[in-house]
Structure formats: structure tokens, C-alpha cells
Image (cartoon, rainbow, N blue to C red):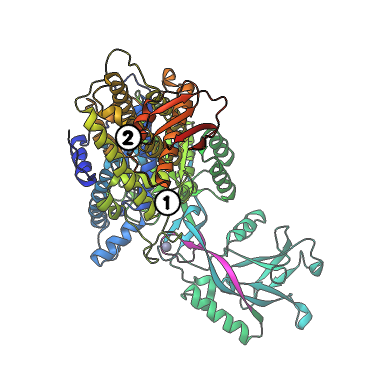
């Protein structure tokens, strides 16, 4: 077989993609092999499978391919998490409409169309990258089957008391006009100003009877329901228990003491409004305070704000400050850097508004205990989940006032208000379109109004493990062929508080067990400049750019070697160049080998090995051991580094130089057979070890070697103890070192590398010398190591303690 001089990734990769097709990696439903089920992330179909996604999927694919070769029946499914705000916004932009201008159904249809196009684009990139996905297990959360699953899970959790409806303060985006969960609130540092206002003591008229209070939110004065001081703050002893009059609004509020007041902030006196921030919600609850809502769902002031009604929050703040100043109730203003909660989607500062919403109960301790039963890799990420659970102050708000999402399967009786939950047979259902089959259980009425709110999209994606496992929400058990908990959840650290957290919560609520045995966390991809990749920074790389020029195998090697799993990984072109060089080097080795291995069949009878061949095979066996160990511990970078080092150093630089003559030789048939066997065995094993990382190249290599099976359906190489040979390794290392030393000597003395020297005397016992003779083109005399002396006419080299004498005359 004659191979092209240069490796051509584009041709080779496309050839194998066509041969593998979509069914090559299908999960076997009737198989005796142990199952390895992956709860693959269903990405949001933006249309762009970016380099961060690609890193995550490379890790998944390394494992999927490795486990498959280790004899597991691997399920690597792929889903799409379709619903949500970003698509709604895109549709509005694309069609120049607002969601309120067209029928909801029509709007949803436009969202679906866009999603389908985007899925197709991302799927094409996953395939081009060589992901061994089982496409017969694809799922799309906007499809009826999945929607039914989500709604059924709502029913089950409603029935077991895990879902309830309540009027409660929630995080609210006034621009998107929807409730959002804690996980959707991002924090940004913004410049604010601290206003010092005067609250009057009742009846007081002169200076001493005012109390100064600092606040960043004077526009909430209408909602001020109390004032608090720290119990140990001596400045305010005697204030607690009294009442103060709120400036401008003139209503009286109680002063109480609370340990959580910070005496160092402002004047040490704090006004409590419903609601300025999360701390207000805490105080409101613990002190059982009244609720005055002054901001509505569109971010406008309500009637409670009296003269400010209808103003935006910002305008109200400005007017309030002017009015306070005019009345001499504003004493000073100070600039302040503030950490403000903003909407994840539109960056508008969120408000905390009390509304009627649907909630999922968060059982803090149960979730923390469950997370301890899961093995986290890297381990330190487990604490992020624990901290997140501890920081949640109220339950998970799952209702959204949006359109493109799974409807909440609920109606309300228009006569008596009783909640009517859809029956299982009615699912999937849009309660705003269809009516329930039964009458109201309380009053017998047949008139219902469907719930307009839809579900948080995490209600879909947090079921992915259950969906993949084919969990039967009726029978309360997984499908027979798939074990549960599933084996692996791979995901980014940016969605621990969302996807990981919600998935554990839902699995506990629906199955009473953890969703997966292991969670593998990946980091983010940084640009070449070390900063987070972003289009505005112009440090953005798309996988496509790399693949077009260098191929998917090379991209995948960057993913493996760029950094340890869990750490943020920098994209570096030099890693791409190094991977490209490695592919070319391995190709050259293969090309050389194929000259000697065409039509080669390993013999049935044991081979009489030469020491250098035993040395190579022993080293190869060690490589198999260390790569396997690295794969078992998700150390993809170490696995690939070892593999590359072996191929460059042991195989290319040393072994091929040593064994070349025997391979070409005609007289020494036994020596040639020994070398051919070692080379064939080594290249086959290298292809197997490389298969998870660079599946195209490995397949091409395997096929060149005349192996009948695909490398991806073969067994992962075992550590063959009988090939471990410490004695041969010692001798082989020495032989390789001697040859390198002699070549260095030749180079230093202006002797051509293939030119013979007069002779070599090696002071070592029992060393096999034929490959030294071949590689140095010089006769070798083996002498006793005892009494080596440097004769005047010779150069004496010290090769790791062994004396090598170069006879020059
Ligand atoms: Zn928003
Ligand atoms: Zn009724």
C-alpha cells in the first residue's frame, strides 16, 4: 500500500463520516454488555455550536468511545432544549413583530421554525466533529412526546405536594415582564448613590427629633413598612419600639432591632421596604410586616405611590429626590458602588414583586445529602452546589409569563376558582386552547379558564436523565434495558446552580434517587488572549475555522490537551499546530511501516524476539497501562501527552532508527520477522489508544494495517503482563542511548551519520549489539565492564555509567 506523503484530514475524515453514518454508534437494547448511559446536555438551539460546546462534547465523546471499547453498551443520546426567551426575542427581531401583535399559536410556530433550522446547523457541526452520538436517541423538548413528559412530571409533583401555587415575592424582570428564578438573576457592579433622608419622630418639630436614614432606593418610600437598628448600636438605644414617620408619605412605621442590620452602613438605621432587596424579604417574613406594593409588573409606580403613580422606577427616584430636597428632608448624597441583581437575558435591574406563582419545593437538606452520593469530578465543584442550595431563600418559581414554553396543565373554574389539573389522558395540553373533559369538582360548573403562564424551561431540561433512561412516570421505574441512576452527567460549571441542581431536585421528587453516579464538570474556553471568548473582544474562534484547515481530529486533540478537565481552557493556535505536526509525524511513521507491513499477517507461532523489539513492546505495554489509568480518571490531557511522547520519542526517534536495517534486510529473516511483528503490534495498539481522541485518523490507520474491524468496535487494549520485560527495557534504553551518543559524536566530529567509524568497544556484559551495529554502521566489540581504560587513540563516552570507546585509529 502506497500512502500519500502528506496526511489529508479533509479527505480522510469525510470518507469515514460517510461510512459510519448515523447508526454506527447505536445503543443495543438487547445486549448482555453492561450499560453506560450518558445524560448528554441538550444545548439551547442558538444555531451556533461554539467552541465551548465543542470542548464539552469532546470530553463526552472521549469517554463514550473509550467506554464502548472497554466493552460497555454505551448510550450517547442527544437532545435539544428548545423553549425560552432568547428564541422569542430572536423571532421578534427577525420578523419585526412583538409577541403581543400576533396570535400566541402563530408566534409559537415561528419559534419552532427558527429552532428547527438552528438544530440542523448545530447537529451538522456535532457530526463533523466526529461525535459518536446515537441519533436514534435524539430528543427535542418542544416535541409533543417530550412536552407530555414534562407536563406529566408536573402532575406527579403536584400530586405528591412538591408543586404548589402561592402569592410570594419573586424575582421579576420588568422588561421581560416575567417572574424569574434565583438562577436567572445575575449580579453586576453599578454606580449608585446613597441618599440620607430624615424620618420624623411623631409629634417632633425641631432638629433633634429627626432620625437620619441612608438608602439607595428613595423611590420605595411608599412601600416602607418598618425601620430597624442593630441591638448593640448604642447610638440608637431607646429608638427601638418607637415609631417614625416616613418622609413625603407621612405614614408611621415601627422601629425594631435585628442582628442582621449592619451598623457601619449609612447611619446604622435601615428602612425596610416591600421589596428593595432580598434582605427586605427576610425581614418582612421574620417580623411579619405588612405588604405595600408600589412597583407593578411593568416597572411602573402603582397607586400606592400616590402622586408618583405611573412613573417609571427611574423617574420616580429622580422626582422623589427633588421633592425631598425641596422639603429639606435630604441631608446628603454619597456615590456608592453597588452589586445589582439584573435579568440574565436583558440586564435590566430586577425588582422583587409579590405575585401569585407556581413553585417547586426546595428540600435543602435532602438535595445536599443526595449531592454527596454523587461523585463529582473535579471534586471541588460539589461545594458550589452546596453553597447554592444554602443561598436559596425561597422555593423555585417555575411559572413564567411568556409564550414559547410548555403550558402549565391547569384550569381554573370561572365560577368558584377551584384549580382543575389536567388528567393524564389529556396530555400534552394547552389549557388556553382546550377545556377539561370533566366538570368542576366543587361547584359542577363546566366553565373554565386555562392557566396563561408557562413553565420555566429548566422544567424540561431537568428531566433529561429520566427521559434518556426511559423512566416511566406512571410505573415509577426506569425502562428495563437502562439502569438508573445513569452513569454520567457531563456539563459546564456555569450551570451547576441550574441544570445540575434542578436535575437532582427533580430526580429526588420523581424517583427518590439521584439521577447519575458521576458528574463531570468542564471549564469554559478562553480566547488566545486569556480572556473569556466574546465577539466584542474579537478573540472568538469557531470550531469550523479550525476544522476547515486542520481537521476535526486536530481540534479534538486541542480539547484533550488544552487543560485538565474542570479547568478553564485557553484556545491556542500553537496547540493546533502541535496536533497537526503530530498527525503528520504519525502518518510518516505509518507510511514507513506500510512499506514493510503490506499484506502482513501476524504469525500464529510465537516470535523469537530481539531485545530491541521486546523493549518496544514492553514500553508499549506500560503506555497502555498509563493511558488506561488516565482515561479512568478523566485525565485526557495526560493520556494524550503520554501517547504523543511514546510515538515521537520511543517509536520514531529510537525504535525505527534501531530496527530499520532489520526491516530492510534480506539476510536476517528472523530479525526481520521480530521487527515486523513489533511494529505491527505497536501501530495497531497506538491506533486503538488514539481512537477516542482522533477517531478519523485512528480508523484510517487501522484500516491501512489491514485490520478487518473498525477500531471503534474493537476492544480497548489490555495490559499484557507477559510483554512486560524490565531486563529488555534496561538493555533497550541503553542501546538507544548508545546509538544517540555515537550519532552525537559523529555530528560533533564532522562524520556523516551513515559513515562507519573504525569500531566501538562497549564495556557491558551480555548486551545485544546487532541493532547498534546497524544504526551506527560500525563494528562493535563487547568487553568486560571491569577495567575499562581510556587508550590514547580513542574517545571514551560515558553513557549512563556504561563506557563506550570510540576507536578512531
Ligand atoms: Zn429581562
Ligand atoms: Zn367551580
Where is 541 relative to 141, above or below?
below
Total residue callouts:
2
- The extreme top residue here reads 605
Res 40 quadrant in image: top left
Q: Which residues are magenta?
A: 334-354
Q: Position of residue 110 (x, y in %)?
A: 23, 56
Q: Left of 134 or right of it: where is 11?
A: left
Residue 491 appearing in the image: yes
Residue labelled with disc 2: 691
Determine crowd level at label 1: few under 14, some 14-19, many 20+ residues with C-alpha closer than 10 A: many
Give how far across and how far down residue 87 sits, in percent.
Answer: 31, 57
Element carrying mark 1:
strand
Residue at the spot x=69%, y=71% of the render?
Answer: 266
Along the viewing direction, whichever of 608 and 147 lies nearer the viewer:
608
- Ligand 1 - quadrant of the structure image: bottom left
550 magenta-colored? no
Vertical comparison of 773 with 219: above or below: above
Q: Nearer the viewer, residue 543 or 591?
A: 591
- Numbered disc in front, either 2 or 1: 2
Label for residue 399? 1
Residue 23 percent across, percent down from the top left: 22, 33
Amino acid at each position: 500500500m502506497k500512502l500519500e506523503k502528506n496526511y489529508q484530514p479533509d479527505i480522510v475524515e469525510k470518507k469515514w463520516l460517510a461510512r459510519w453514518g448515523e447508526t454506527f454508534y447505536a445503543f443495543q437494547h438487547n445486549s448482555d454488555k453492561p450499560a453506560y448511559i450518558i445524560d448528554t446536555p441538550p444545548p439551547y438551539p442558538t444555531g451556533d455550536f461554539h467552541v465551548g460546546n465543542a470542548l464539552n462534547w469532546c470530553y463526552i465523546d472521549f469517554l463514550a468511545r473509550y467506554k464502548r471499547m472497554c466493552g460497555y453498551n454505551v448510550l450517547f443520546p442527544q437532545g435539544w432544549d428548545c423553549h425560552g426567551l432568547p428564541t422569542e426575542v430572536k423571532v421578534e427581531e427577525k420578523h419585526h413583530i412583538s409577541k403581543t401583535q400576533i396570535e400566541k399559536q402563530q408566534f409559537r410556530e415561528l419559534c419552532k421554525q427558527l429552532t428547527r433550522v438552528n438544530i440542523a446547523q448545530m447537529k451538522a457541526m456535532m457530526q463533523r466533529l466526529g461525535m459518536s452520538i446515537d441519533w436514534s436517541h435524539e430528543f427535542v423538548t418542544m416535541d409533543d412526546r417530550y412536552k407530555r413528559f414534562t407536563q406529566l412530571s408536573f402532575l406527579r409533583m403536584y400530586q405528591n405536594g412538591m408543586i404548589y401555587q402561592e402569592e410570594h415575592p419573586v424575582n421579576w424582570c420588568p422588561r421581560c415582564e416575567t417572574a424569574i428564578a434565583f438562577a436567572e438573576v445575575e449580579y453586576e457592579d453599578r454606580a449608585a448613590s446613597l441618599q440620607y433622608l430624615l424620618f420624623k419622630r411623631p409629634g417632633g418639630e425641631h432638629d433633634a427629633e429627626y432620625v437620619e436614614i441612608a438608602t439607595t432606593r428613595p423611590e420605595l418610600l411608599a412601600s416602607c413598612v418598618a425601620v430597624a437598628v442593630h441591638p448593640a448600636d448604642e447610638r440608637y438605644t431607646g429608638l427601638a419600639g418607637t415609631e417614625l414617620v416616613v418622609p413625603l408619605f407621612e405614614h408611621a412605621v415601627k422601629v425594631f432591632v435585628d442582628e442582621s442590620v449592619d451598623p457601619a452602613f449609612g447611619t446604622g438605621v435601615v428602612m425596610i421596604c416591600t421589596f428593595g432587596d432580598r434582605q427586605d424579604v427576610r425581614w418582612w417574613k421574620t417580623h411579619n410586616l405588612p405588604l405595600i406594593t408600589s412597583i407593578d409588573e411593568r416597572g411602573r409606580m402603582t397607586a400606592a405611590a400616590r402622586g408618583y403613580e405611573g412613573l417609571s422606577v427611574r423617574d420616580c427616584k429622580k422626582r422623589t429626590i427633588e421633592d425631598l430636597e425641596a422639603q429639606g428632608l435630604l441631608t446628603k448624597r454619597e456615590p456608592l458602588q453597588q452589586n445589582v441583581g439584573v435579568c440574565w437575558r436583558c440586564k435590566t435591574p430586577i425588582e422583587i414583586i409579590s405575585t401569585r406563582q407556581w413553585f417547586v419545593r426546595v428540600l435543602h437538606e435532602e438535595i445536599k445529602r443526595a449531592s454527596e452520593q454523587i461523585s463529582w469530578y473535579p471534586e471541588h465543584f460539589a461545594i458550589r452546589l452546596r453553597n447554592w442550595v444554602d443561598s436559596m431563600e425561597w422555593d423555585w418559581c417555575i411559572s413564567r409569563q411568556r409564550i414559547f414554553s410548555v403550558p402549565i396543565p391547569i384550569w381554573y373554574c370561572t365560577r368558584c376558582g377551584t384549580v382543575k389539573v389536567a388528567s393524564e389522558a389529556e396530555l400534552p395540553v394547552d389549557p388556553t386552547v382546550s377545556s377539561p373533559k370533566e366538570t368542576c369538582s366543587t361547584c359542577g360548573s363546566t366553565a373554565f379558564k386555562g392557566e396563561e403562564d408557562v413553565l420555566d424551561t429548566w422544567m424540561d431540561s431537568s428531566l433529561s436523565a429520566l427521559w434518556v433512561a426511559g423512566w416511566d412516570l406512571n410505573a415509577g421505574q426506569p425502562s428495563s434495558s437502562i439502569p438508573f441512576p445513569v452513569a454520567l452527567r457531563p456539563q459546564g460549571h456555569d450551570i451547576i446552580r441550574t441544570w445540575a441542581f434542578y436535575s437532582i431536585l427533580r430526580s429526588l421528587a420523581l424517583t427518590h434517587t439521584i439521577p447519575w453516579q458521576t458528574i463531570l464538570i468542564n471549564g469554559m474556553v478562553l480566547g488566545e488572549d486569556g480572556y473569556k471568548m466574546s465577539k466584542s473582544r474579537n478573540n472568538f474562534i469557531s470550531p469550523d475555522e479550525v476544522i476547515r484547515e486542520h481537521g476535526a481530529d486536530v481540534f479534538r486533540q486541542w480539547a484533550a490537551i488544552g487543560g485538565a478537565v474542570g479547568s478553564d481552557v485557553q484556545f491556542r493556535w500553537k496547540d493546533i499546530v502541535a496536533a497537526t505536526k503530530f498527525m503528520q509525524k504519525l502518518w510518516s511513521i505509518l507510511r514507513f511501516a506500510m512499506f514493510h507491513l503490506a499484506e502482513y499477517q501476524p504469525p500464529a507461532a510465537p516470535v523469537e524476539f530481539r531485545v530491541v523489539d521486546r523493549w518496544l513492546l514492553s514500553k508499549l505495554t506500560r503506555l497502555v497501562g498509563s493511558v488506561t489509568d488516565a482515561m479512568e480518571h478523566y485525565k485526557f490531557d495526560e493520556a494524550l501527552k503520554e501517547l504523543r511522547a511514546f510515538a515521537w520519542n520511543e517509536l520514531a526517534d529510537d525504535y525505527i532508527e534501531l530496527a530499520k536495517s532489520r526491516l530492510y534486510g534480506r539476510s536476517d529473516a528472523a530479525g526481520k520477522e521480530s521487527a515486523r511483528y513489533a511494529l505491527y503490534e505497536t501501530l495497531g495498539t497506538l491506533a486503538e489508544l488514539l481512537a477516542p481522541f482522533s477517531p478519523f485518523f485512528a480508523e484510517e490507520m487501522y484500516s491501512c494495517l489491514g485490520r478487518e474491524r473498525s477500531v471503534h468496535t474493537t476492544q480497548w487494549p489490555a495490559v499484557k503482563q507477559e510483554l512486560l520485560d524490565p531486563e529488555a527495557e534496561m538493555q533497550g534504553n541503553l542501546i538507544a542511548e548508545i546509538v544517540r551518543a555515537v550519532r552525537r559524536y559523529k555530528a560533533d566530529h564532522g562524520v556523516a551519520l551513515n559513515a562507519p567509524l573504525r569500531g566501538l568497544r562497549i564495556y557491558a556484559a551480555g548486551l545485544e549489539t546487532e541493532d547498534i551495529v546497524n544504526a551506527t554502521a560500525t563494528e562493535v566489540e563487547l568487553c568486560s565492564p571491569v577495567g575499562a581504560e581510556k587508550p590514547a587513540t580513542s574517545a571514551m563516552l560515558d553513557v549512563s555509567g556504561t563506557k563506550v570507546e570510540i576507536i578512531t585509529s
